[in-house]
Each structure stands twice: as C-alpha cells, then as structure tokens.
C-alpha cells in the first residue's frame, strides 16, 4: 500500500511540478548542521544533529590545507544523488601583504549508507588565484550567485575592482568600473542577485553573472537568514 | 479511485511542506526577475529600491528609527500574482537605556508583467526587552520559525515569527550570529563560548570555541 501511495504521489508530482520530485527525495542530512571555526591558518568543521532520530556528532575534521590568513568561508549548492550529498566549500585566504588572495575549493561528500552513519570526505580541488591584493590588513569580501563568486578587497592598487570567478570553470574575470571607488561590501540574496557596493556606485549582478544595473549610491542585499548590518 | 487520489494529493502536500523545496521554488518564479536592495541612511531610515532589468519599479524609505542596526528579509509566500514576505529591522536605540526594538513589516509585491507594485506596511513593533543603545553591536539571524536578536552588551532573545512572542534564548551577549541556508543558527559570545540552534529554535550543541555557519551566498568568518 505504501509503495502504491508513493507511486501515486510521484505521478501527481509529475503533473504538478518537476520540483515535486526534489521534495519527494529523502533529505538524509535534514537534521544535521555543519559549523566551522578558524584559527586563521586552519579551518575546522563539525557536523552534528539528528540522524535516524539519534542526536550526536557524526563527523569533524580540518580542511586539508594550511592557510596564510583565512578571511571568509562559504558553501556551494547542495546536490543529492541517491544516498550521497555533495557540496563545495570555498575558503578565501587573504594571504600575505602585497600578494594576491587565493580562493581554495574543497569538494565535500556526505555518504549515508543507511547504518546510522554519515561518512564524510573532503578533498581539495584546484585553487584559484583571485588577482586582488590581500594581506593581514585587508578587509575581504565574498558573495555568490548560483553561477559566480564575487571577491573584493579594500587594499592595494585593485581595491576598486572585483574578481568574478565562474563556479563551473574557475576562470577569473576582473570587473573594472571606472570611477567606482573602493569596494565597500558585496552581498547576495536568495534569488541569486548580487550587489557590488563601491564607494561611488553599486553594481547589481544578475543570476547568470551579467551586469543588471548601475546605481548611483549605496545598495546592499538582504537575505532570509543572516542579517545585513551597516557596521 | 477518488479516495486514492485524495491520499496521493495529501502525501504530495505533506512532502512539499516538509522539505520546502517545491513550495519555495514555486514561490520564487513569479518575481524571479525582480530584486530589492537596501541602504541604511545613518541609522535613521532604511531606503529600498525594487528593480528589474528595465529599471526600478518602486522605491521608498522606512523611518524613523532610533539607530536601525540590522535587517533581514523573511521567506516569500505567493498567492496568484502577489508575493508577500516579512521585513525585520532591528533598532538598537540611541541611549544605553533605550530598549532594543524589532520592526516587523509586511512587504507585498504585486507582479503585473514587467511591473512590480510594492507596498510595505508596519505589521508589528516588538519590544525586545533588553537595553542596547548606539554603542551596542547588533546581531540578528533567522532560524525557521524564530529569529535571534541580541547585542554584545545584552542577552540574546528569540522572537517567534508568527506570534512575535519574545523569549530569552538561554544565551547571553553575542559577538556574532550566523545561519546556514536551512536555518541552523550559531551564536558566539564575546567570551568565546558558542551554542547551536536548530531551525525550530531548540538548542543542539554548546561549548567553548568560536564557530560560525557557512551559507551559499555570503562568505564570512565569525559573522563578519
């Protein structure tokens, strides 16, 4: 009977919306949270919560890289295939004075074999030279749409430029907007619009990485989970 | 046959509600090409502009505030061509004896082709029950059903998104509040202790250390 219900539900889903199929998937990690900490030269993570109604921590580790000075961490989109969930983890290293920042990329896999465990593996991927100056005094900024990661720094000769990095290819495109001033903030919202807020202008980037609009003045995106603060 | 159809439909609704994916994807479709950006005007006002590729269709100013310090949007809900979401603005106050407030607005976008008519109305002003002031550093993050609000000079409270009931979170002052895309929240105190809360606002883990959540849109470390 249960199989019949599921089959019927799946049929209705196909009629209603393709997205229903996604909803019908079992979210193996629905009760688990991953949280991070950093010493500046390392990034540690822990995964805890409920799995099969058991409250515990299911994994912990340190990303396999020694960094110079970590200044931002971000996750990539979650993808589920069968019992495996994959996502990227992005770590921005502002490096040492006078040198370029580096974006480190890690591929994380959560495998749920069905025995109440979460087998987690984290593998380094090719890193990306951001082409913007960093260093200990740099205030670094990072935000992303589904397609593009945007990175800025408020120091050096390129403080008025933003690196746009393709998530699929890793290619860096330096965005240069004349007379824009130093980068103040980079913020994103759930629908994948990103605001590049410079001193004199704000550039709104669309979900595909294209320039949507130029605004004379400050502008920042607000999202549903993390408050935007002007300080 | 009809009975089976009812069961199937019920199961679909439950699945969608449980996981959120199908509903939110559907909700996003109608206003997919519109975005809203904000600006703080010296803490006294919050400006907003709603735009699309062809230009901005709406703009306005929310005011007055006694030092607005943090801003969150709520998840969208769609009915026909109308998208509604909450807008939460935290106010620290000016003097150290001022109680922090949470202004809850209802933002309605009525989509008509390439036009988006925006209406924002104050739904509730919530006294957060703690003193803050301009020198306090605000922190605010949202779980699924509650949001957390506090400062480095006060304790941290939860606000129920539906009833606006305010409760002490069990956590003291906060240096940072971060959330992931699913609504798990990490609070970190100035003394470098932390607690993690599930999307329902229940505490999961606590201890010593400085931890933060990572999300898919904004890169950060320790909430900065």
Image (cartoon, helix red, strand yellow):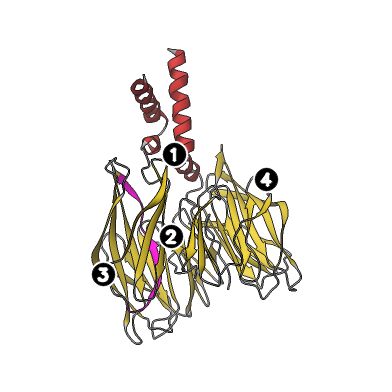
Specify the quadrant that holds the C terminus of chain A: bottom right
Report the residue marked by disc 3.
Answer: A127
Report the residue marked by disc 1.
Answer: B22
Q: CA distance from mark 2 to mark 3?
A: 19 Å
Chain containing the residue with disc 4: B
Residue at disc 4, secondary structure: loop
Vertical order, B95 against B185 (above or below):
below
First in sequence, mark 2 or 4: give its number.
4
Q: Quadrant of residue B169?
A: bottom right
Query: Which numbered marker is on residue B163?
Result: 4
- The x and y percentages for residue A59 are 33, 56
Q: Is residue A70 magenta?
A: yes
Tell me if label 2 and label 1 are in contact, CB under 8 Å. Answer: no
Chain containing the residue with disc 1: B
Q: CA distance from mark 2 to mark 1?
A: 20 Å
Vertical order, B211 against A174 (above or below):
above
First in sequence, mark 4 or 1: give its number.
1
Q: What secondary structure characterizes most of the magenta part?
A: strand
- The x and y percentages for residue B216 are 41, 58
First in sequence, mark 2 or 1: give its number.
1
Number of marks in picture: 4
For residue B91, side relative to residue A5 (left or right): right
The span shown in magenta is A68-80
Q: CA distance from mark 4 to mark 1?
A: 25 Å
- Badge 1 crowding class, 10 Å Cα cut-off, few under 14, some 14 to 19, many 20 or more, is many
């Amino acid at each position: 009977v249960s199989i019949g219900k599921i089959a019927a539900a799946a049929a209705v889903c196909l009629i209603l919306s393709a997205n229903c199929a996604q909803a019908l998937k079992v979210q193996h990690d629905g009760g688990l949270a991953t949280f991070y900490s950093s010493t500046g030269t390392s990034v540690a993570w822990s995964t805890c919560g409920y799995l099969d109604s058991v409250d515990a921590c299911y994994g912990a580790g340190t990303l396999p890289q020694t960094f110079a000075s970590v200044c931002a961490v971000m996750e990539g989109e979650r993808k589920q295939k069968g019992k495996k969930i994959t996502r990227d983890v992005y770590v921005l290293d502002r490096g040492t004075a006078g040198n370029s920042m580096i974006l480190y990329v890690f591929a994380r896999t959560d495998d749920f074999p069905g025995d109440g465990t979460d087998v987690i593996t984290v593998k380094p991927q090719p890193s990306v030279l951001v082409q913007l100056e960093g260093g200990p005094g740099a205030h670094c900024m990072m935000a992303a749409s589904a397609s593009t990661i945007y990175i800025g720094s408020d120091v050096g000769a390129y403080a008025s430029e933003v690196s746009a990095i393709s998530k699929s290819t890793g290619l860096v495109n330096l965005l240069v907007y004349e007379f824009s001033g130093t980068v103040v903030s980079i913020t994103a919202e759930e629908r994948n619009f990103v605001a590049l807020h410079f001193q004199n202008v704000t550039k709104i980037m669309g979900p595909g990485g294209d320039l949507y609009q130029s605004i004379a003045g400050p502008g920042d995106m607000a999202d549903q989970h993390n408050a935007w603060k002007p300080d | 046959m009809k009975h089976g159809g009812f069961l199937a439909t019920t199961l679909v609704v439950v699945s969608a509600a449980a996981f959120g994916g199908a509903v939110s994807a559907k909700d996003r479709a109608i206003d997919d090409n519109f975005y809203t950006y904000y600006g703080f005007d010296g803490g006294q006002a919050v400006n907003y502009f709603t735009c699309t590729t062809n230009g901005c269709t709406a703009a306005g100013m929310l005011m007055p505030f006694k030092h607005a310090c943090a801003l969150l949007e709520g998840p969208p809900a769609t009915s026909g061509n109308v998208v509604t979401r909450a807008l939460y603005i935290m106010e620290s106050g000016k003097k150290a004896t001022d109680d922090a407030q949470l202004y809850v607005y209802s933002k309605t976008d009525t989509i008509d082709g390439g036009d988006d008519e925006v209406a924002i109305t104050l739904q509730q002003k919530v006294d957060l029950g703690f003193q803050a002031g301009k020198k306090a550093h605000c922190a605010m993050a949202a779980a699924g059903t509650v949001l957390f609000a506090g400062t480095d000079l006060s304790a941290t409270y939860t606000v129920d998104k539906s009833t606006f009931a305010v409760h002490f979170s069990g956590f003291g002052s906060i240096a940072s509040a971060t959330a992931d895309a699913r609504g798990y929240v990490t609070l970190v105190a100035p003394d470098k202790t932390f607690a993690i809360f599930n999307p329902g606002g229940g505490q999961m883990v606590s201890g010593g250390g400085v931890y933060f959540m990572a999300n898919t849109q904004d890169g950060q470390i320790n909430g900065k």
